[in-house]
Image (cartoon, helix red, strand yellow):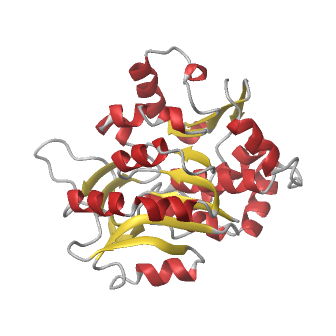
Amino acid sequence: MRDILAFGSIVIDNVLLVKRFASVNETVQAEKYRYTYGGAGANVAVAAARLGAKSGVFAVSGYDFKRFNYERTLIEQGVDVRGVIENSNSPMPRSFIISIEGSDDQILYYYENRRETSKLLFKNQKFAEELSKEYKVLHFSTGHFEFYYRFLRSKKVPAVVSFDPGQETFSYPYRVVRILPYVHMLFMNNHEAKRIKELLKIRSLKEIKGPRLVCVSMGARGSVIIFNDRVYRVPAVKPAKLVDPTGAGDSHRAAFLVALLKGYDVPTAGKIASVVASFTIEAEGAQTSLPTWEKVIRRYERFFKEEFPEPQGSWEETKKLLLSSGK
């Protein structure tokens, strides 16, 4: 079987680096501008492929997907693009990311025709179900949550389900909440985790019904992972330089999943994910500086000051725990 099928988006990222965000009616001079390949679905697929996993992406692209050489780039990275559905009437979505170097982002998103994209996804649901049967893990990130809900509710795919709702936790919170019972792993940042607790009226993330594993990223403070009634705290790995945080969350998720598939236990997978995220921050664009597994090993040993471990178990053992009912 193949490893990870990433559901999400394929986007052209327009990145502006600034020293501070503008106030209302204020103009701030951008220090740098670049357009790069992005979209949460594609970012996860590329990061996983760079780490040696057999990954694919399921998303709707635009008529300029080939014109921007995005398709060729994905294929060269080893990503399965059979799940890319072309929208011949609209361009790829665009994101406009205003980023303070080494800090936070402001993100604007533009869809030419979101409704048509939704129609294409629903039209291809059977195809998605068939393609998914070839993969061990399905990862759902920022995209069309109505489609995700219908797809997951059908329960026709036996794979482990991973979910990273991202900013839609704030934009469409009810869509996020109703997906939670169908997922086995949930990834969020600390702001999203706070919002989820407010929405569900719970005091602890341990109370969430659905996911057996919850991972909360906290930027420079690392991450917290809740799994099998245990809490693990993983430090952030310091990058060689702070350039652009765009896509660090996506590469973190991809690395975490790849590590689990390779047989590493949860705390070690968290460390590996932290290492991979540190590479992403070192260059402009979400897919620009993704590391190979060999580079991950070297940085892991340098940062954690220990020999890179052998896998502690197997994916089948972790899968059994993730799929078991109850908390």
Image point (35%, 51%), residue name:
144
Estimate the x, y position of residue 276 in percent, counting from the top left. 64, 57
Which picture quadrant has residue 66?
bottom left
Estimate the x, y position of residue 88 in percent, counting from the top left. 25, 77
Tell which of 243 and 264 is nearer to you: 264
Instruction: Please indicate whether residue 103 sits to the left or right of residue 258 in the image.
Output: left
Instruction: Please indicate whether residue 139 sits to the left or right of residue 194 in the image.
Output: right
Q: Is residue 282 visible?
A: no
Image point (54%, 41%), residue name:
219
Estimate the x, y position of residue 24 in percent, counting from the top left. 14, 42
Image point (85%, 55%), residue name:
308
* Rendered-image quadrant of the C terminus: top right
Q: Is residue 158 visible?
A: yes
Image point (74%, 50%), residue name:
260
Instruction: Please indicate whether residue 144 sits to the left or right of residue 201 in the image.
Output: left
Q: How many marks?
A: 0
| In this view, 70 is above or below 157 | below
Which picture quadrant has residue 76?
bottom right
| In this view, 84 is above or below 144 | below
